[in-house]
């Protein structure tokens, strides 16, 4: 989660909503990324999506079996579904997101019988620092 | 939808699950894509995602306000959420997807109060040809 927080801080410096993610396996950190939706003009360029895509590219596999994902904010429904498609084993997230989250809020992606793969979910990991980064970012923009 | 079906047929020829999508605005077709998850080793490379990303890149904007998306299959939860983030105005889809869909099945992404933008949804457009392509693809692989 330290690496995910580092990516979130780097995202804030780029003027992006500060969210960071890292994909980790037995081999260590396979990929890490921060949010780049503005820079890339890409509404899908959330930290989790970029980290998953980079990890799949690095491993030459569209499934990340046995790998875990650390992300500083509760994933949105898009990312939650992508995490399932990638067969991530364990999802560790920092701050909960009552407005935009899709794991423990909103559509609760993993609770539906049509969900083919649900990771084990652990929320609140590094929550205080992750939430502080987001609060500071939005406070500076109001 | 003719262009989306063309992209779906091209995807089948590449050995990909035959789904195609096109983003259309007043200026015509901005981007079109077929599923490339296997080719790219990318679980997020669904037709809708690739078409949205290409359209945003072409327009230099992370929002596709006033644009419509045509896709041959009901979008999954990941794509449904991305379509909302991109502010797509109207979503036209072909075949319903009771097992993997996220619009009219499963998590029904647009029905939650936390959904910031829901497109107008029209299902069953070009359904018979879209469904036939999928049936044929899976029949050949059983």
Image (cartoon, coloured by chain):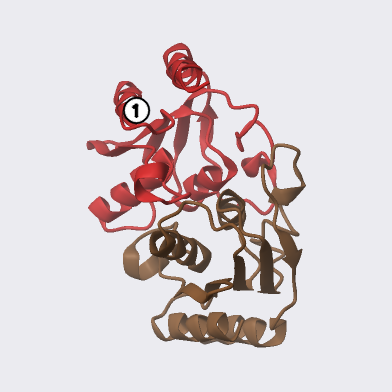
Chain colours: A brown, B red
Q: Is residue A45 visible?
A: no
Q: Secondary structure at mark 1?
A: helix
B137 lies above or below A33: above
Q: Is residue A36 left or right of residue A1?
A: left
Which residue is more in the foreground, B37 or B117? B37
Where is residue A52? Give x, y as percent: 49, 62
Q: Residue at x 77, y 47 (%)?
A: A111
Q: Is residue A122 left or right of residue A141?
A: right
Q: Residue at x 38, y 59 (%)?
A: A42
Q: Is residue A29 visible?
A: yes
Q: Residue at x 59, y 65 (%)?
A: A67
Where is residue B44? Give x, y as percent: 46, 50
A57 lies above or below B139: below
Where is residue A21? Give x, y as percent: 54, 73
Total numbered labels placed on residues in the image? 1
Q: Subunit of mark 1?
A: B
Where is residue A110? Give x, y as percent: 72, 50
Q: In which quadrant of the rendered view does residue B102 lie?
A: top right
Which residue is more in the foreground, A68 or A15? A68
Which residue is more in the foreground, B71 or A114? A114
A14 lies above or below A48: below
Residue that carries the numbered disc 1 in the rendered image: B4
Quarter of the image with the N terminus of chain B is top left
**For the residue carrying disc 1, how many other residues have a C-alpha within 10 Å: few (<14), some (14-19), or many (20+)?**
many
Q: Residue at x 50, y 16 (%)?
A: B139
Q: In which quadrant of the rendered view does residue A101 lie?
A: bottom right
């Amino acid at each position: 989660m330290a690496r995910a927080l580092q990516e979130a801080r780097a995202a804030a410096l780029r003027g992006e909503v500060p969210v960071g993610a890292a994909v980790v396996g037995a081999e260590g950190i396979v990929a890490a990324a921060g949010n780049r939706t503005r820079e890339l003009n890409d509404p899908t360029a959330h930290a989790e999506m970029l980290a998953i895509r980079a990890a799949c590219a690095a491993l030459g596999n569209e499934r990340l079996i046995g790998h875990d994902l650390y992300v500083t904010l509760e994933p949105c429904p898009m990312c939650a579904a992508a995490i399932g498609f990638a067969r991530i084993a364990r999802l560790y997230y920092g701050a909960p997101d009552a407005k935009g989250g899709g794991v423990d809020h909103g559509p609760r992606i993993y609770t539906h019988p049509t969900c083919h793969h649900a990771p084990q979910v652990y929320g609140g990991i590094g929550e205080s620092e992750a939430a502080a980064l987001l609060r500071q970012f939005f406070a500076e923009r109001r």
